[in-house]
Amino acid sequence: MREEDLEIVYSKDNEAIEKDYSKCISCGYCVKTCRDEVTVARMYEIDKVLEPICINCGQCVNMCPTESIHEKFDYLRLKKLLKDESIVKTVSIAPAVRVAIGEEFGGDLGENLEEKVVTALRKLGFDYVFDITFGADLTIMEEAMELVNRIKNKGTLPMFTSCCPAWVKYEEIFYPEFIPNLSSCKSPIAMQSTMIKTYFAGKKKIPAKDILNVVIAPCTAKKSEIKRKEINRSGVSDTDFVLTTRELAMLLKEEGIDLKTLDKSNFDSPLGKGSSAGLIFGNSGGVMEAALRTAYYYLTGENLSKEKLVFNEVRGMEGIKEASVMIGDLEIKVAVLNGISNAKILLDKIRKGEVNYHFVEVMSCLGGCIAGGGQPKSTLLNLNKTKLARINGIYKEDEKASIRFCHENPEIKEIYKDFLEYPNSSKAEELLHTTYQDKSYLLGGKR
């Protein structure tokens, strides 16, 4: 992208983001964001590709002052389906949504409105309301075991997290040689949706095709992720719709539902109970911290003491965070990349053999999912204040939680006992793991 460019061109086939050119004022914010902060626009030459490359992170959406650029709105189609009594309607809420949606209704920054959101979703017509934190716990059970197995069996290292779809797409396009390093684990949303249309459907004796399954996420890239054929395991689309936090707020307002005035209610079971380790997925460093808590248990048979439970080295807003963690006699070297612009820096160092790690977390958005492309917008002046409030809102819940390890979630124990057998079992591999593709052909303009 040229320095003088003031507008981003979007492919008509973009699955997550679209642009209303009539509202564009050529302010250049979208270009500066993609080129200078996200840096994707610096990774290729626009004249050599058939269509613009987009990792669907949505940061351009967050920066657009006129709503010219926005997520592809799915809530209007969903609104009609919610009135269909012939189908069972399920919905799951991602961790970062609960500490941000209140901003759309005049609430305090970082306020956790989880229980009111559950009530609101039932008022909209959903039959079952679940918590993606359960899916995050499930991801850690699989991912921590995968990490332990790679270390023990001298597998491909470092292992990269795979729960951020913008990062996965970035790697498939720009660094396909590192595809073997990606964890084979599906994202929490993808795992949760597969469990809804297999495990939950089986328990309730509901055909998967009769379930309308929706996810509320802070992320625009999730709209693209659910279209990946390789993540669907139920014979139909595991996730039928992804709504952003903003879209949920739009839908609630159109239906006259004021979040602030609602009573509190609880998630449905199963798939409605999560540990606080799953909850901190919403923050940069959260996946790493949750995984280390459970990897420690896998390797030692014991839980970390309360004094050692928090890994401050991987928390915070630094671009690249590094730590060495001792688990028994084993030293595990880890890194956390906060923002996709740091991926090129670290991947180039790994490629040259300048650094060595066992495990690397990558989140495309600065701050993690709390700053996703589908979250309520904040002014530039308040941006850091807003992010920190959301981050602290999640960590406060972790501090006071009674269950702080994914492997101690009773619903997780139940699903392995009744359905999945054990982490990385053949059934778990079939339902909860995925594959990736080399998409570097997009840089050359032809397949």
Image: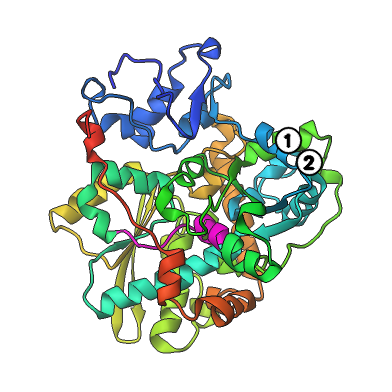
In the image, 446 versus 48, the foreground residue is 446
Mark 2 to mark 1: distance in Å?
6 Å
- Amino acid at the residue labelled 2: Lys
Q: Are marks 2 and 1 in contact (CB under 8 Å)?
A: yes
Q: Residue drawn at (32%, 43%), measured in percent from left and top? A: 170
In the image, 360 versus 430, the foreground residue is 430
Residue 37 seen from this side = yes
Instruction: Check the image and report above or below for 430 versus 80.
Output: below
Please say which color scheme the image uses: rainbow
Q: Is residue 251 left or right of residue 155?
A: right
Q: Position of residue 407 (x, y in %)?
A: 53, 78
Instruction: Give me the disc on residue 83.
Output: 2
- Please report the bounds of the magenta region as a residue range: 182-194
Residue under numbered circle 1: 80
Q: Is residue 186 magenta?
A: yes
Quadrant where the N terminus sits is top left
Q: Position of residue 394 (x, y in %)?
A: 61, 58
Q: Is residue 342 magenta?
A: no
